[in-house]
Image: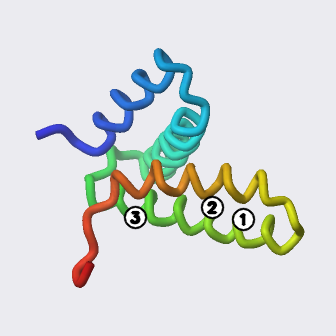
């Protein structure tokens, strides 16, 4: 079975070929966050650690989305909502859902 990092890389390549801007932006920024964490910790991250970064990235986008909505910028809020949907696909299902 592939690691989450490998799946993200393959999906990023696919998004580049398909010229899918939203998935590409979401995956690129998430992969950058993962790489930064690996550099900081000086080790490859486990899938569990990658999941924590994914959760953090989703949370950051939710906060930004809510702020854009509060400011009346619905276009940017919708873009962030689509990025959240892309990233949630890589998270394990939560208990009780």
As drawn, the residue found furthest toward the right would be 71
Q: Which secondary structure, mark 1? A: helix
Q: Residue at x 22, y 42 (%)?
A: 3
- SS label for mark 2: helix
Way the structure is coloured: rainbow
Q: Which residue is mark 3?
A: 52
Q: Earlier in the sequence, mark 1 or mark 3?
A: 3
CA separation in Å, label 3 and label 2:
14 Å
Q: Nearer the viewer, residue 97 or 25?
A: 97
Q: Nearer the viewer, residue 92 or 97?
A: 97
Mark 3 vs mark 2: give the one in front.
2
What number is the disc on residue 73? none
Q: Secondary structure at mark 3?
A: helix
Closer to the camera, 72 or 30? 72
* Number of numbered tags placed on the structure image: 3
* Residue ID for mark 1: 64
- Residue 40 higher or lower than 1, as above or below: below
In this rendering, position of residue 92 left or right of residue 63: left
Picture quarter containing residue 49?
bottom left
Q: Earlier in the sequence, mark 3 or mark 2?
A: 3
- Given contact means CB atoms under 8 Å apart, are the residues at marks 2 and 1 in contact? yes
* Image x and y of residue 75, in percent: 78, 52
**How busy is the neighbourhood of tag 2: few (under 14 within 10 Å), some, or many (20 plus)?**
many
Q: CA distance from mark 1 to mark 3?
A: 18 Å
The image position of residue 92, as x and y in percent, is 26, 63
Residue identified by numbered label 2: 61
* Rendered residue at 40%/23% (across/down): 14
């Amino acid at each position: 079975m592939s690691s989450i990092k490998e799946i993200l890389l393959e999906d990023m390549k696919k998004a580049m070929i398909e010229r899918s801007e939203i998935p590409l932006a979401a995956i690129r920024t998430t992969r950058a966050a993962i790489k930064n964490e690996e550099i900081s910790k000086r080790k490859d991250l486990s899938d569990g650690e990658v999941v924590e970064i994914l959760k953090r990235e989703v949370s950051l986008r939710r906060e930004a989305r809510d702020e854009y909505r509060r400011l009346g910028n619905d276009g940017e809020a919708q873009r962030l909502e689509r990025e959240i949907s892309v990233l949630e696909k890589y998270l394990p299902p939560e208990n009780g859902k």
